[in-house]
Amino acid sequence: MNRSYAYPRFVLLCLVSLVSWRTAIIATLGLALRNDAYTHILLIIPISISLIVSEWRSRKPQPEPNFRAGLALLVPAILIGVIGGGWWGPASLPAGVQLSLGMLAVVIWWIGSFVCCFGTRISRMYVFPLCFLLWLVPLPEFALNHIVSFLQQGSACAANLLFATAGVPVTQDGVQLTIPGLTLEVAEECSSIRSSLMLLVTTMVLAHLLLRSAWGKGIVILAAIPLSIAKNGLRIFTLSILAVYVDPSFLHGRLHHQGGVVFFLIFLAGLFALLWLVRWAERKVMVQSAVRKLATPIAASEATPDNFV
């Protein structure tokens, strides 16, 4: 493939996907606009494009088209689209699953198109923003329900722990908490599924930009889940204490419905503290590694006897 045609061919392949999977793309966009659990989808393409463009300008890589490697992804994308993504899917397949498979096919097609037009070397350079596109795949309802249930249970346990730490008598029955003067239930709407997914997406981007090691990024991304649950538990604890000891209207007031920003900032403070700690650990590991590399040739030279004539 000619390098000079890499860009127009990539645009052409993307246009093919927009036409072929237009139903799935439009349905996913509509889902993101009307359902809070999928709002994060609106951020994925702008973030991925921004990451690629910013790094492309600094690195200025030369396209090395690789049709064979790209075809290894384009063919599975077509198969997923044909079998389960709505082109020729079984009638018994739930609509949500078809939509997920359709968008999975779109993302694989885009990644395959990138590999096909720009090559494997450049694709490895941009593996994060390319794989980040997988966030465009909407979770089927049954999977989302399990996540919401997990967040409900986790938030209730976190709030229970905070009540106990503060010396407030509390009993827990599933997602229901009882303290003196108040019985509350962590409903699905209080699971913070929207903010949890948004925070996870934010954490992944910050870890990619600020950290170097795979282990450091993994630690921060995994920590985002308990941090998000702790944030929601803190919100439940704060609103409950204010409702019992200050004014019951706090359970239905502005802090309940619009106070998410406050707790989001608290989460960010904890996240940046963790990022700073991991960056410090990374630097320490790098220094120790550099010292060992310097010490190895010195030790080797000392172990070699000098030869005198």
Image (cartoon, rainbow, N blue to C red):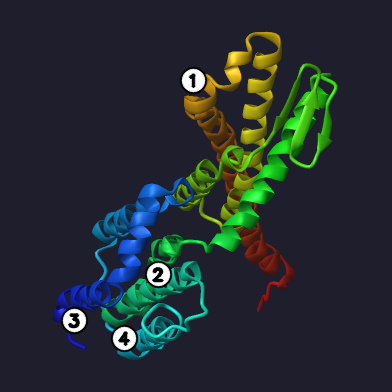
Residue 128 seen in the current view = no
Tag 1 or tag 2, which sits nearer the N-term? 2
Q: CB under 8 Å between callouts 4 and 2?
A: no
Q: Is residue 37 above or below residue 116?
A: above
- 271 or 63: nearer the viewer: 271
Q: Which mark is residue 3?
A: 3
Mark 1: which amino acid?
Arg
Q: Residue at x 56, y 53 (%)?
A: 217
Viewer-nearest of discs 4 and 2: 2
Figure disc tally: 4
- 82 or 131: nearer the viewer: 82
Q: Is residue 147 above or below residue 227?
A: below
Q: Give the distance between the C-alpha atoms of the residues marked 3 and 1, in whole angstroms.
A: 57 Å
Tag 1 or tag 4, which sits nearer the N-term? 4
Q: Residues within 10 Å of mark 1 (few under 14, many from 20)?
A: few
Viewer-nearest of discs 3 and 1: 1
Tag 2 residue: 103
Tag 4 residue: 66
